[in-house]
């Protein structure tokens, strides 16, 4: 079991430091699954910021099940994220899939994301552990809690103390109704086992925008420190994960509801 105080991760964003941790206000990360073009990423950044988000998320390099699906715009999307960072003041969170891209990503990202599919890519974990930006480590879709914590340990052991754990749902039997089963119970379990900050991603955790608000509330009730929510200006036209993406209006409404319950947003 955990010994000592909860650790906090302080991230330097253009708007100033943002702290993620047990004894701090809830931090909300929002944005599209993929960075599609400059207009949509800048617009999304400004709208989620106005609603109270502290970070913009968006994939430049996308881990897609099919090699024929949109793979992300890569390096050019990093430039668009830099433009959105500049325009909004938000911190940027984006995924690294290949350590060959890490240096370029670190130049733009305030937090580097390791996705569910790479949770046990140990050579990648060692490399993100050896660079200075905080790391968001998603739980593998079939990973045990122990495997997840040991993956985090790879980053810590490589010298980077700033790791945030993100639950994004585990593989289930009900894929036509829910994309994954969001393991809300992992929040109190992690609280017992680790000092690291805890984020919940109800978007990938359910797969459907309609379920995101209630599961966000549930995650806060369970005691999470942060939420990651996919938001797209036109979910029907999204190049990835449209069905689970909130419109900016729905996100704004959710943020107002979240402010009423639990930790102040
Ligand atoms: C994402 O955050 O867009 C993503 C691909 O998530 P995950 O790794 O949890 O599937
Ligand atoms: Mn996604």
Image: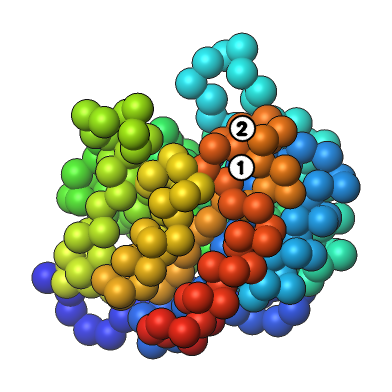
* Residue for badge 2: 240
Mark 2 C-beta to ligand 2 under 8 Å: yes
Determine whether 14 is above or below 121 in the image.
below
Q: Quadrant of residue 212?
A: bottom left
Q: Quadrant of the N terminus?
A: bottom left
The residue located at (85%, 64%) in the rendering is 86
Estimate the spatial distance between the alpha carbons at disc 2 and disc 1, rounded to whole Å: 6 Å
Question: Which mark sits nearer the N-terminus, 2 or 1?
Answer: 1
Q: Are marks 2 and 1 in contact (CB under 8 Å)?
A: yes
Q: What residue is at 54 percent from the left and 29 percent from the top? A: 63
- Judging from the image, what secondary structure is the residue with disc 1 in? loop
Q: Tell me the element at label 2.
A: loop
* Above/below status of 262 relative to 178: below
Ligand 2 has an atom within 8 Å of the beta carbon of the residue at disc 1: yes
Q: What label sits on residue 33 in the rendered view?
A: 1
- Where is residue 46 drawn, in percent x and y? 79, 65
Horizontal placement of 3 versus 215: left or right? left
Residue in view at x 57 percent, y 14 percent: 67
Report which quarter residue 53 is drawn in.
bottom right
x, y percentage for residue 136? 48, 56
Tally of numbered tags = 2
Q: Is residue 161 visible?
A: no
Q: In the rendering, at what x and y percent does residue 89 appear? A: 78, 71
| Residue 3 shows up from this direction | yes
Q: Position of residue 184 (x, y in %)?
A: 26, 59
């Amino acid at each position: 079991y955990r010994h000592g105080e909860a650790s906090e991760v302080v991230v330097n964003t253009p708007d100033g430091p943002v702290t993620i941790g047990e004894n701090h206000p809830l931090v909300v990360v929002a944005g599209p699954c993929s960075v599609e073009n400059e207009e949509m990423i800048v617009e999304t950044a400004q709208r989620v910021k106005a609603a109270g988000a502290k970070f913009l998320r968006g994939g430049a390099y996308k881990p897609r099940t099919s090699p024929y699906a949109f793979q992300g715009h890569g390096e050019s999307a990093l430039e668009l994220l830099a433009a959105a960072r500049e325009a909004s003041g938000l911190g940027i969170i984006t995924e690294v899939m290949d350590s060959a891209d890490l240096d370029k990503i670190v130049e733009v990202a305030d937090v580097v994301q390791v996705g569910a599919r790479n949770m046990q890519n140990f050579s990648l974990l060692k490399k993100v552990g050896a660079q200075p930006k905080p790391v968001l480590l998603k739980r593998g879709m079939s990973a045990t809690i122990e495997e997840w914590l040991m993956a985090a340990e790879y980053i810590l052991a490589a010298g980077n103390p700033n790791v945030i754990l993100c639950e994004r749902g585990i593989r289930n039997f009900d894929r036509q109704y829910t994309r994954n089963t969001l393991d809300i119970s992992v929040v109190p379990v992690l609280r017992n086992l680790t000092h690291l900050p805890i984020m919940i991603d109800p978007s990938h955790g359910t797969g459907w925008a309609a379920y995101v608000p209630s599961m966000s509330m549930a995650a806060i009730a369970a005691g999470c420190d942060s939420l990651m929510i996919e938001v797209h200006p036109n979910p029907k036209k999204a190049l990835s994960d449209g069905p689970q993406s909130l419109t900016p209006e729905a996100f704004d409404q959710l943020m107002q509801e979240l402010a009423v319950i639990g930790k102040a947003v």
